[in-house]
């Protein structure tokens, strides 16, 4: 699995030296958390997957092909993980407060993509928000920003 991830980033995504060596791992960690959100209510809706891929593509400026490959790797990584910490720890160490809030917004986008918010989805966003140390106020503001775009 690790070899597939390394090969993907080495061959498909040009390294950005300004972004630092951890950028690819951060992309994978963010995507994996989004896949955890996708599975939170045990009802994967096609709109959720589409929203997830669109958010990744926009956030990380990836091509459609790169986005699909990142999504496939993240999906497998999330399915094989035993803890959120391997993803949230990486985000905590390397993302700015604004980038963390952007992750929370993307989680809300996936949660609301099917037109409803399940209690397990909300609980997962809250848990991840706490793990990446986003203040409650920012958590709520991110939720409201996403809801505004849906109206």
Image: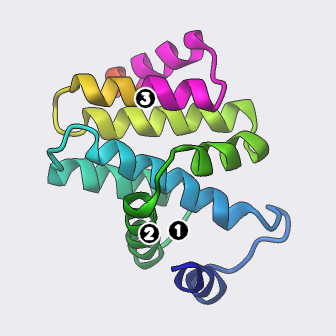
* Quarter assignment of residue 107: top left
- Identify the residue at image location x=47%, y=60%: 57
In the picture of the structure, the residue carrying the numbered disc 2 is 67
Q: Residues within 10 Å of mark 2 (few under 14, many from 20)?
A: many
- Asked whether 129 falls inside the magenta stretch, the response is yes
Residue range highlighted in magenta: 125-145
- Asked whether 149 falls inside the magenta stretch, the response is no
Q: Residues within 10 Å of mark 3 (few under 14, many from 20)?
A: many
Q: As drawn, which residue projects farthest toward the front?
A: 82
**Residue 145 screen position, x and y as percent:** 43, 22
Q: As drawn, which residue projects farthest toward the top?
A: 137
Q: Are marks 1 and 3 in contact (CB under 8 Å)?
A: no
Q: Examine the rendered structure and indicate whether residue 57 appears above or below residue 110.
A: below
Q: Which mark is residue 125?
A: 3
In the picture of the structure, the residue carrying the numbered disc 1 is 62
**Residue 20 screen position, x and y as percent:** 83, 63
Q: Are marks 2 and 1 in contact (CB under 8 Å)?
A: yes
In this picture, residue 49 sits left or right of residue 60: left
């Amino acid at each position: 699995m690790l070899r597939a991830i390394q090969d993907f980033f080495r061959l498909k995504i040009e390294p950005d030296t300004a972004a630092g060596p951890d950028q690819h791992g951060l992309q994978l960690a963010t995507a994996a958390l989004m896949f955890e959100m996708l599975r939170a209510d045990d009802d994967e809706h096609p709109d959720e997957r589409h929203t997830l891929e669109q958010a990744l593509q926009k956030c990380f400026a990836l091509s459609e092909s790169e986005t699909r490959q990142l999504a496939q790797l993240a999906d497998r990584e999330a399915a094989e993980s035993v803890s959120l910490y391997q993803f949230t720890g990486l985000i905590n160490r390397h993302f700015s407060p604004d980038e963390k809030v952007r992750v929370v917004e993307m989680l809300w986008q996936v949660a609301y993509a099917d037109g409803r918010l399940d209690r397990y989805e909300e609980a997962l966003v809250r848990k991840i928000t706490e793990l990446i140390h986003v203040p409650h106020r920012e958590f709520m503001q991110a939720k409201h920003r996403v809801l505004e775009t849906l109206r």
